[in-house]
């Protein structure tokens, strides 16, 4: 099941992935598909896996736990401790079971609650932050997340191209205009913040990849 609309380029990238090992735990992916839980795309999961291995973080912050699929990708490709934020208790219960099933439960701290309330209260530094929560909140979360990054820290954000709507490849229906407008603010801010170096990558539903500058 696909939770994003994609083009022939993404179809090609997905075809290439068939030559590689699955980017994440296949059983958890099937669980997400069974219960209709949106998770990171296969191409996005592969990028997340590679970035995690490159950064080699000791602490990871994730916005959007769902049932633990992306969290497990980061845990299985690092020795980091994961702090993950979500409000959906039913999904979080599945996530707890999945973290435990894969032997990672003792490295996870779940921060249950609304992201707008939880994220401003988070303290410390995180070498890797994965933002995959409500798209309409990205712009308000960004200043807090940048403050949590050390020099060289990486911020990876999913769904930033909104199934081609941000580029104009697909029309923005009236009911999605607010999310579009808020994503437009985020895209401007994340690409123009003087503390960050950012590239936007057309994998999955689009991912922005930012590194915090050392000065």
Image (cartoon, helix red, strand yellow):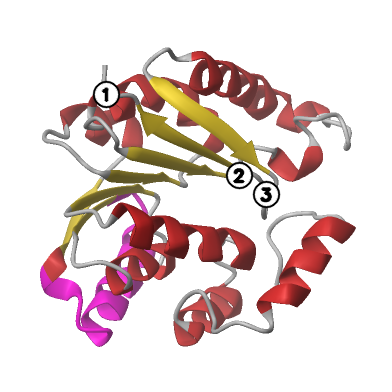
User: With 160 as the anchor, is 143 left or right in this view?
Assistant: left
Where is mark 3, residue-wise?
Answer: 205
Residue tagged 2: 159
| The N terminus sits in image quarter | bottom right
- Find out whether residue 87 is within the magenta segment: yes
Determine the residue positioned at 42% across, 61% down: 66
**Left-right relation of 45 to 113:** right
Do the residues under discs 3 and 2 have CB atoms within 8 angstroms? Answer: yes
Place of residue 60 in the rendered image (x, y in percent of width and height, measured from the top left)? 25, 51
What number is the disc on residue 134?
none
Q: Is residue 13 above or below residue 129?
A: below
Asked if residue 137 lies left or right of residue 3, the reply is left
The answer to whether residue 81 is visible is yes
Q: Could you tell me if residue 39 is visible in this image? A: no
Q: Answer with left or right where residue 33 lies relative to residue 130.
A: right
User: Residue 123: x percent and y percent?
Assistant: 12, 33
Q: Earlier in the sequence, mark 3 or mark 2?
A: 2
- Density class for disc 1 (Cα within 10 Å; few <14, some 14-19, many ≥20) is few
Q: Note whether 89 is above or below 28 in the view shown.
A: above
Crowd rating for badge 2 (residues with CA inside 10 Å; few <14, some 14–19, many 20+): many
Label 3: which secondary element:
loop
């Amino acid at each position: 099941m696909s939770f994003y609309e994609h083009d022939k380029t993404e179809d090609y990238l997905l075809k290439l992935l068939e030559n590689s090992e699955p980017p994440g735990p296949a059983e958890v992916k099937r669980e997400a598909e069974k219960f209709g839980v949106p998770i990171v795309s296969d191409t996005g999961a592969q990028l997340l896996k590679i970035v995690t291995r490159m950064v080699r973080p000791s602490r990871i912050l994730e916005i959007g736990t769902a049932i633990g699929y992306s969290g497990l990708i980061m845990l299985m490709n690092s020795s980091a401790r994961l702090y993950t934020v979500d409000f959906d208790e039913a999904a979080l219960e599945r996530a707890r079971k999945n973290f435990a099933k894969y032997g990672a439960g003792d490295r996870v701290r779940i921060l249950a609650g609304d992201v707008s309330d939880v994220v401003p209260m988070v303290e410390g530094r995180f070498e890797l932050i994965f933002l995959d929560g409500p798209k309409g909140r990205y712009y308000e979360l960004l200043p807090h997340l940048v403050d949590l990054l050390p020099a060289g820290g990486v911020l990876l954000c999913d769904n930033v191209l909104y199934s081609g709507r941000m580029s104009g490849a697909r029309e923005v229906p009236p009911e999605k205009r607010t999310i579009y407008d808020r994503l437009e603010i985020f895209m401007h801010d994340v690409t123009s913040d003087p503390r960050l170096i950012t590239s936007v990558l057309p994998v999955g539903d689009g991912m922005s990849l930012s590194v915090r500058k050392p000065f």
